[in-house]
Amino acid sequence: MTFTEHLEELRQRLIRCIIGAVIGFAVCYPFSERLFELLMEPLLTALPPESTLIFTSLPEAFFTYLKVSFVAGLFLVSPFIFYQLWKFIAPGLYDTEKKYILPIAFFSAFFFVVGALFGYFVVFPFGFQFFMGFATDFIRPMPSVREYLSFSIKLLFAFGVIFELPLFIFFLARLGMVTANGLRKKRKYAILIAFIVSAILTPPDVVTQIFMSGPLIILYELGIWVAHFFGKKKKEEGSSQELAQKEEG
């Protein structure tokens, strides 16, 4: 496949992803108010009495509902979007590896949603309780809708992305780019990187960082076992090389 053909393939996949996102938005918009209420629930539970969310500009609430609908639509059509992503990568794979595209796309969406749910049900309650602990009689928290939406979406996507780690390792292991032994030797660097990534993706508080770095380290350990059981064996590597030589011949 030439470079121009790759660009054309990318354009087609992006158009399909955009169409899927628009459909997801259209499906979720009628439920935008209820979706935003669900998104606010962890914060409202943690807010002190007489505190509430506010909006500071006239169109802020309207655009908030649009953004919530769009994000919910992305989660709804995430299996289709991940499928388009992996289909774009598929031409560079061997035929024996292309059979994994559909299950990988499904589990990509699955882990992405599970990661976001982990952030919502586990991290949000503890994180918001921590932040609300600084409220006093003279300091009353009244976060704006826009700030809360930006904060929560950032965390939801961050946890969704880090939960893709075992699947990413599976893909690299099937390509023979990583091995279980190699991942074990780099464990100490992985732990360091986990804390660095958590510090970048989360607010500057220890609680939220631990809630991200902890699962990230566990997912790395899971990825080691994934590479152990599903990584490309030497026999498979030899077969792939022979197939490549035949194709070149």
Image (cartoon, grey):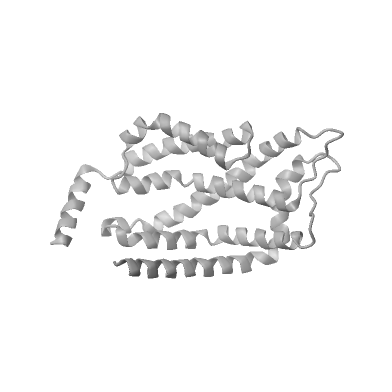
Quadrant of residue 127 within the rendered picture: top right
Report the quarter where the C terminus lies. bottom left
Residue 6, x across and y down, in percent: 35, 66
Q: Return the residue nearer the eye: 188 or 238.
A: 188
Q: Where 99 sits versus 12, above or below?
A: above
Q: Residue at x 63, y 43 (%)?
A: 121
Residue 239, x across and y down, in percent: 18, 51
Q: Is residue 28 left or right of residue 115?
A: right
Quadrant of residue 135 within the rendered picture: top right
Q: Residue at x 86, y 43 (%)?
A: 50
Residue 169, x across and y down, in percent: 38, 44
Q: Return the residue nearer the eye: 80 or 90.
A: 90
Q: Residue at x 45, y 52 (%)?
A: 107
Residue lying farthest to the left in this orientation: 249
Report the quarter where the N terminus lies. bottom left
Q: Is residue 116 left or right of residue 109?
A: right
Q: Where 203 sits versus 108, above or below?
A: above
Q: Residue at x 83, y 33 (%)?
A: 136
Quadrant of residue 126 within the rendered picture: top right
Residue 185, x across and y down, in percent: 34, 30
